[in-house]
Image: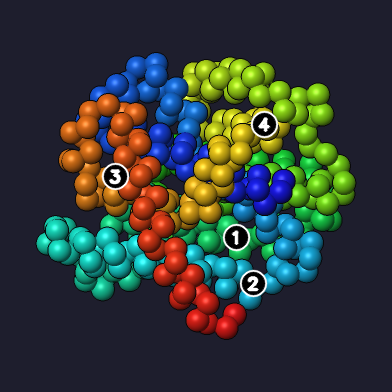
């Protein structure tokens, strides 16, 4: 998987994320029934980011760059992005437009700054488990090199099944109220998708292709296969199906010959995906949902969300880059 393909996959994941969140917001018309269920099941985006992360970190591991110092610096850059978004939407716009909506008391502010709590925006639940999962890759890849891909995929898949079972059974009654237990469960659940990405990188470094030559560039056939996969996924409601469907979509996407304008758009979205993900919950749910609901049509709401999150990411990314470049890493 090249850097271009990684960026394209992240761009696709961002588009899927915006569709996925349409179903999570009450009041949006046309998101019930077959269409709503299919979109809800087929657009879960997190696995794609995990694949790209697992792939990239394994490349760093193969180059002997995956130290705890490397992971700490990488995580600090993510935290700076989170703090910038919280500064803008919680301390800035939130305090100005919705006085009293966001508590700035230390008991609320500090855990949210650390990602330990997501009181300000429920869509930020993934942040700390994702950071912790990247730190787990140090040991995960050590085991992968020694035990092999099949063993590690089976091991992390079993962990994912166990974590998914715990979440389905105890989320509302216990886990959601005990962050000290919920975050480790979410972290372990993510390791299977990261291992999938790492396995792809491992095979690539060995010179083994994971694509099929006969399918490469046959876009019409690939799109038909994607539609079939989406329709099948729409009827499967179990949580553990999410990463396996994402594996199928990722594999098919690697075969697509994208037109240059489409490739440029997806890569642009992929490069800005971090800020778009962090900001989207505030824009779509926490602060401006009442205005978006007036648009009524899901496709129109999706397009406006896309435009708003892209503009915010475009404004924040240069500032983030300036902050990062001021420090000698």
Query: Which is nearer the N-term, disc 4 or disc 3?
Result: 4
Which of the pair 324/127 is nearer the observer? 324
Give the residue drawn at x 69%, y 36%.
Answer: 254
Give the residue drawn at x 32%, y 24%.
Answer: 31
* Secondary-structure class at tag 4: loop
Query: Which is nearer the N-term, disc 3 or disc 2?
Result: 2
What coloring was used for the rendering?
rainbow
Query: Which is nearer the N-term, disc 4 or disc 1?
Result: 1
Q: Which is closer to the viewer, label 4 or label 1? A: 4
Q: Which residue is identified by label 3?
A: 284
Left or right: 74 as drawn, with respect to 178:
right
What is the distance, in whole Å, between disc 2 and disc 1 at their CAs? 11 Å
* Secondary-structure class at tag 2: helix
Left or right: 229 as drawn, with respect to 235:
right
Query: Which is nearer the N-term, disc 2 or disc 1?
Result: 2
* Secondary-structure class at tag 3: helix
Which of the pair 52/235 is nearer the observer? 52
Q: Which residue is identified by label 4?
A: 256
What is the distance, in whole Å, between disc 4 and disc 1 at their CAs? 29 Å
Q: Which is closer to the viewer, label 4 or label 3? A: 4
Res. 134 mark: 1
Q: Is residue 293 visible?
A: yes
Give the residue drawn at x 15%, y 63%.
Answer: 96
Which of the pair 194/267 is nearer the observer? 267
Q: Which is closer to the viewer, label 4 or label 2? A: 4
Q: Which is closer to the viewer, label 3 or label 1? A: 3
Query: Which is nearer the N-term, disc 4 or disc 2?
Result: 2
Q: Which residue is identified by label 2?
A: 70
Residue at the far front: name it.
261
Where's residue 10, x and y in %? 55, 46
């Amino acid at each position: 998987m090249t850097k271009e393909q990684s960026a394209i996959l992240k761009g696709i994941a961002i588009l899927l994320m915006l569709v996925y969140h349409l179903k999570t917001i009450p009041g949006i018309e046309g998101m019930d029934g077959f269409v709503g269920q299919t979109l809800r099941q087929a657009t879960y985006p997190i696995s794609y980011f995990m694949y790209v992360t697992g792939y990239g970190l394994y490349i760093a591991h193969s180059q002997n760059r995956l130290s705890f110092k490397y992971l700490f610096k990488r995580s600090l850059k993510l935290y700076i992005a989170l703090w910038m978004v919280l500064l803008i939407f919680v301390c800035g716009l939130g305090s100005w437009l919705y006085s009293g909506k966001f508590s700035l008391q230390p008991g609320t502010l500090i855990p949210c700054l650390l990602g330990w709590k997501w009181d300000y925006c429920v869509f930020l639940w993934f942040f700390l488990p994702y950071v912790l999962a990247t730190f787990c890759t140090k040991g995960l890849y050590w085991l992968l090199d020694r035990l092999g891909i099949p063993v590690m995929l089976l091991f992390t898949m079993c962990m994912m099944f166990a974590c998914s079972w715990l979440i389905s059974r105890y989320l509302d009654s216990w886990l959601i109220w005990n962050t000290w237990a919920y975050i480790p469960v979410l972290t372990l659940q993510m390791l299977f998708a990261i291992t999938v990405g790492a396995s792809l990188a491992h095979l690539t470094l060995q010179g083994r292709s994971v694509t099929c030559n006969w399918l490469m560039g046959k876009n019409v056939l690939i799109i038909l296969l994607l539609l079939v996969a989406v329709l099948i996924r729409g009827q499967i409601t179990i949580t553990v199906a999410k990463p396996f469907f994402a594996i199928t979509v990722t594999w098919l996407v690697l075969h697509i010959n994208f037109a240059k304008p489409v490739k440029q758009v997806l890569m642009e979205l992929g490069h800005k995906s971090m800020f778009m993900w962090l900001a989207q919950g505030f824009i779509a749910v926490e602060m401006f949902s009442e205005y978006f609901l007036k648009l009524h049509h899901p496709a129109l709401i999706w397009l406006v969300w896309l435009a708003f999150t892209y503009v915010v990411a475009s404004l924040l990314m240069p500032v983030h880059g300036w902050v990062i470049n001021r420090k000698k890493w």
